[in-house]
Image (tube, rainbow, N blue to C red):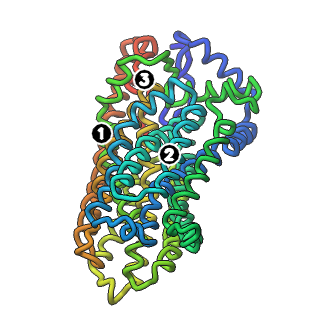
Amino acid sequence: MDKSSEVGIGGEVTEKRDEFVLPELQEYHDLRAKFDENRVKSLLRRVDIRLMPPLAILYLVAFIDRSNIGNARLQGLEKDLNLSPQQYAWCLTIFFFPYALFEVPSNIMLKLLRPSIWLTIIVFGWGIVMTVMGLCQNYSALLACRFFLGVFEAGLFPGCTFITTAWYKRFEVQYRVALFYSAASLSGAFSGLLAFAIGNMAGVRGYSGWRWLFILEGIATCVVASICYFFIPDSPGSAKWLSPEEARFLELRLQFDGHDKGYKEGGFEWKYLIQGFTDAKVYIGTIIFGAICICTYALSYSLPTMINLLGYSAANAQLLTIPVYAFGCIICVLNSVLSDRYKHRAAFIIAPMGMTMIGLIIGMAVDPTKLPGVIYFALFLVAGGIFSGIPTTVAWTSNNLAGQWKRAVGMALQFTLGNLVGGTVGSNIFLVKEKPKYMTAYSVLFSVTACAFLSGWALLFCIRRWNAQKASLVEQAEREGRDLDAECKDLGDKNPYFKYTL
């Protein structure tokens, strides 16, 4: 047989046959000859510098704004608004219903509009809501603000992730997702530091410290929104800081990477929605993602209070959250670097889940009133594990969905279900009546982490089986002399030459 192309496990175009050569494939081969390894690395560094800081800043701001209610609680929010424990819990929970429901529509809007336009709109929207939260006088007003905060924040994480997959190849994605997602762990550190500093403004113009916390962080978010339009590149083709040759090379290297295997699609069609909603990989990944979200939100909303109950003052508890989140950030990035380097996902989900379970076992076994330092150490293990798991899960799903519309829908669906379950459960399991032991919370977190651990193994088993089935189809077609390229060119990730990432 003559030679041409196929996509291997690593997502690179390799030689196979000449019978079915897309015109773009020859163009890609010609461009690839001009871009040696050093030039590609230099080009990707430029993309990193232009793309990653804006996304990281947006996600940092988003996570601070959604979780600063935990800091506000220590500054008298419940007392000033006369909130019962149940009402406070509802203010946490209400955020996640619109946050989940609007993720798929938001990703569709991201595709219909430009990412720079859509992200600017939603960031400015939640900045206004956050500012208004500082003026709330009762439970109903706070509840309404938290609802609309969820509406506007819904599109950010799936949007940032989708933008990343539009610029980087399969095994370049996770490290970049980790770079902006690590802002979530850094947000905990920044939030604690900001809460400590802004808390000193209590009494200024007659406002409590928690009011200034919401107002100043909301204004800062609006400022970020006003400039983010100019710093978020929509795609290689629209980036003015790339030459036409560089932009075309980036587009083609994605087209013939394992992401899409030369698969091209036009505008939105309902079949893409159906494909995203009926893929088993999405739902197994959602189990993992949802379990990690439960842990993430439980930790984010309750960490200041947990440390406060270890015997530290409210102010010192804010500061002591910083090392925990910083450790989570470091482990998150390190785990992602290794996952991309070894081109493997499963082990880098399973291992962090094991780390989290060890921390939770310590939390269940140790009395916090007698050994507070041991509990504080356990929180490091939990943070390191859960913050490492999200980028790997996102990258694994992204790697194994081909076609931008299917990937946008599938990933948004995973975020929708995962955040809905994660937020509603995670924000309600630390029961006031059980402090400081919180046995229900630790038991639930251990159970869902174990579920994520086992689901990682299950998905690994399924993918190995599916890849073996694809290899068998290729071998059979070669024996029969059939041209699978021509038969399967529009199948996306169902293409036999598309090898799923383990």
Query: Which numbered disc, 1 or 3, marks the residue that appears first in the sequence?
Result: 1
Relative to 12, 451 lies left or right: left
The one nearer the camera, 26 or 47, is 47
* Residue 492, label in figure: 3
**Toward which corner of the image does residue 469 lie, by quadrant?**
top left
Residue nearest the observer in this picture, 139 or 301: 139
Q: Which of marks 1 and 2 is nearer the N terminus?
A: 2
User: Dot 1, how many residues are within 10 Å of its Cα: few (below 14), some (14-19), or many (20+)?
Assistant: some
Answer above or below: position of 236 versus 458: above
Q: Which amino acid does label 3 sit on?
A: Gly
Q: Name the residue under label 2.
A: 126
Find the distance from the CA under tag 3 to the CA under tag 2.
36 Å
Mark 1 and mark 2 residues within 8 Å of each other at the beta carbon: no
Q: Nearer the viewer, mark 1 or mark 3?
A: 1
Location of residue 300 by image quarter:
bottom left
| Amino acid type at mark 2 | Trp
Instruction: Judge left or right: residue 405 versus residue 88.
Output: right
Q: State if disc 3 and disc 1 touch (CB < 8 Å).
A: no
Q: Which residue is drawn at 56% across and 18% down?
A: 4
| N-terminal label among 3 and 2 | 2
- The residues tagged by marks 1 and 3 sit, at their Cα atoms, a distance apart of 18 Å
Q: What residue is shown at x 30% (from left), y 42% (from top)?
A: 284
Residue 27, position in %: x, y?
A: 67, 17
- The residue at 39%/73% (across/down) is 305
Question: What residue would you read off at disc 1?
Answer: 283
